[in-house]
Image (cartoon, grey):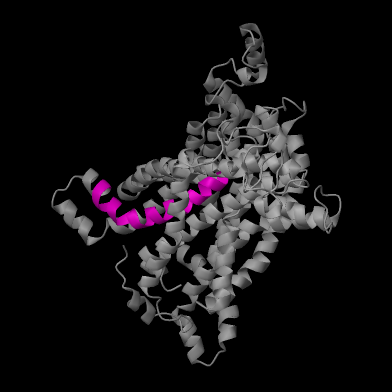
Amino acid sequence: MSRAAAHIGRALATLWLAVTAAFLLTRVSGDPAVRIAGELATDDILDGIRHQLGTDRPLIVQYFDYLWHLIRFDLGKSLTYHTDNLELIGSRLPASLALAVGAMAVAIVVGVPLGVISAARVGSLIDRVVSVISLIGQSVPLFWVGLMAIMFLAVRWGMLPAGGNESLTAYILPTLTLATIPLAQITRLTRSSMGEALSGGFISAGLARGLSRTRMIWNHALRHTALPVLTVIALQAGMLLSGSVTVEVVYSWPGMGRLIASAVELRDFTLVQGLVVVAALVFVVANLAVDLLYPVIDPRLRRSRS
Amino acid sequence: MSAIPADVAVAGAAPATRPVAPRRRDRRSILVFGIPLGVLILVSLVASWLPLPDPNRQMLRDSKLPPLLFGGSWDHPLGTDLLGRDMLSRLVHGGQLALILGIGGTLAGLLPGVTLGLIGGYRRGWVDAAISRVVEAQLALPGIMLAIAILVSSGRSVTVIIVVLSLLSWAQYARIVRAETIALRDRTFVLALRAAGVPTRRIIFRHLLANTAGSISVLAALQVGGMILIESSLSFLGLGVVAPDISWGAMLAGGRDQITQAWWIATLPGVAISLVVLLTNLFADALRRAYDPRQRTY
C-alpha cells in the first residue's frame, strides 16, 4: 500500500513540475498582449488587454492564481472560442483518444508477434525485413505518410475517405498512420527483451525437459517481455496525443491536435496552456497506471518489495 | 565500455542465437551509411556554389512544372513549385537548415543533459533526486505541444528553434548518462582515482565522461534524425523558420493543397526528410552495434 502511495506522490510531483513548466514557458517567453494586439498597438490598448488577461499582476500572484484554478479543474476561458477551455478540450478529447487507442491496439497486435518472431530467428530473412521496416517506420514524417495515403488511397483510387470521422472507414487511414511510430518501437523492444528472455536459464531448462521450443517462446519467454513492453506503451500513450497533432491536421480529424493547431493560428494562449496541461495529465496518469500494474503482472516485484 | 567480451555473452546465450556477427561487418556498415550521409552533408554545405538556380527566385510562368521523368525538362530536373521556384535547388538549400537544426539541436540538448546526468549519477543524494524529478517532468510534457507553446509566445528564429529542440532532448541524455554513471561510480578504477586524490570534477568530466562517451555518441546520432523530424513537423504546422529560410517541412506544407495537381511539391521534400533521417538512423544503429558489446548478439 505504501508503495502505491509513493508512486502517487511521485506522479503528483511530476505533474506539478510539468504544470509549472507549462506556466513559465508560456509567460516568460513573451508578452501575450503584444501578440494579441499586434506590434502597432498603443500602450493604453496593451494595458487594457493585460488587465483583461490578468497578466498585469506580479508573476508569482499569477502563478498561484493559475494553480488555484487548476486544482478546481478550471483551465480558464478560451480567448477565441469564448467558452470554457475544459469544456472545449473535453468535447475534442474523445476523438483523439479513439485515434490513440486504435493506433496503440494496432501497434500491439502487430508489433508484439513481429518482435517475437524476429527474436526467435535472429539473423533470418524475416528478422532483417522486420528490423529494416521498423527502422523506416521511425524515420518517415507522419504527416507525409498521411499525405501520401490520402493522395493514393483516397484521391487516386477512391478507396477510403480522406478526412473527418463520420464513417467507420474514415478511422482506417488515421489509425494506421498514427500506429507507425509505436509499432516500430514496440517491435524493436519486444525483439530485444525477447532476445534477453531467450538467453535465460529457464529456457534451456525447459528445453532440456522436453518442452517444445514454440511453447517455451510463446508461453514462458513472452511473459518476460511484458514489463518493458508495458513501459514503452505507457510512454507512447502520452506521445500519441502529441504525435497526433500533425496527423489530425492532415486528416482533418476533429480532435485535440487540430484544436491546438487552430489555437496556435489564433494565438489563443490560455487554450494552448490548457491543452498542454491536459496532455501532461493523460501522460502522467498512463505512467502511474503502469507503475501500479507492475506488481500485479510480475509476482517477483510483489515479493521483493514487501 | 562494458567489459564483457562478446564470446562470453554467447556462451550463456539461448539456443536460438547464432554466432556473433563479425565486427568487421559492423565497421563496414558504418561506412556504407556514413559515406552517403557525408556526401549529402557536403552537397548541402556547398549548395551556394553549385550551378543551381536561386532557390527563392519566383517565375510564375514556370509554375508547377513536372520533374524530368514525368515530362519535365533539364532546366528544372525535379520540377518547380506553385511559384515557379526550382525544386532541386530548394531541396539542396533546405538541407542546410536540416543540417544546422539536426546537429545544433542535438548538441544543444547533449551538453546540459550529459552534464546533469554525470553530476546526478555521481553525487547521488538530493542533487540526484532533484535532477531526476526535473527529468521526469520534462519527459511528462508532450514534446510537440511544449514546442508549440513556446513558439507561439516567442518569436520564430533558428536560435529559438534550437533552444526548443534542446528542451525536447536534454532529458534523455540525462537519464541514460545518469544510469551509466551510477553503474560506473563504484567500479575499482573510480575508487583508485579517488584514493589517488584526483579532484571530483576531474573524475566526472574526464574519466566518467570518457567511459560514457560510447552511449552518448550513439544516442546523439539517433537524436539527429529525431530533431529533423520534429523540426519538419513544426514547419508543417507553420511554426518553423520564416522565409527566405528554406525548410523541408514548410515546402511540404506548401504542397499540401496542390497534391492533386502537382504531387511532386509535397512528395519530394518528404522523400528528402525520410532519406536523411533513415540514413542517420541506420548510421546510428551501425555505431551502436560496433560500440555496444551488449547489443552485438541481437
Q: Relative to B74, does residue B9 appear above or below in the rendering?
A: below
Q: Which residues are magenta?
A: B205-230
Q: Relative to A5, does residue B5 appear above or below in the rendering?
A: below
Return the x and y of residue A267 as percentages of the image width and height.
Answer: 67, 27
User: Position of B280 compared to A33: left or right?
Assistant: left
Q: In the orientation shown, which residue stands out farthest toward the bottom? A: A210
Q: How many marks?
A: 0
Residue A253, image quadrant: top right
User: Position of A153 compared to B208: left or right?
Assistant: right
Return the x and y of residue A43 as percentages of the image width and height.
Answer: 61, 7
Return the x and y of residue A130 as percentages of the image width and height.
Answer: 58, 70
Return the x and y of residue B26 as percentages of the image width and height.
Answer: 40, 68
Q: Is B213 a magenta residue?
A: yes
Residue drawn at the location 17% of the way across and 57% of the way down? B192
Residue drawn at the location 21% of the way across and 59% of the way down? B189
Q: In the orientation shown, which residue stands out farthest toward the right? A: A167
User: Position of B7 compared to A44: left or right?
Assistant: left
Q: Main secondary structure of the magenta part?
A: helix
Residue drawn at the location 63% of the way across and 8% of the way down? A42
Residue A230 appears in the rendering: no
Q: Is A95 a magenta residue?
A: no
Residue closer to the observer: A108 or A154: A154
User: Position of A42 compared to B294: left or right?
Assistant: right
Residue A82 appears in the rendering: yes
Q: Relative to B35, does residue A241 appear above or below in the rendering?
A: above
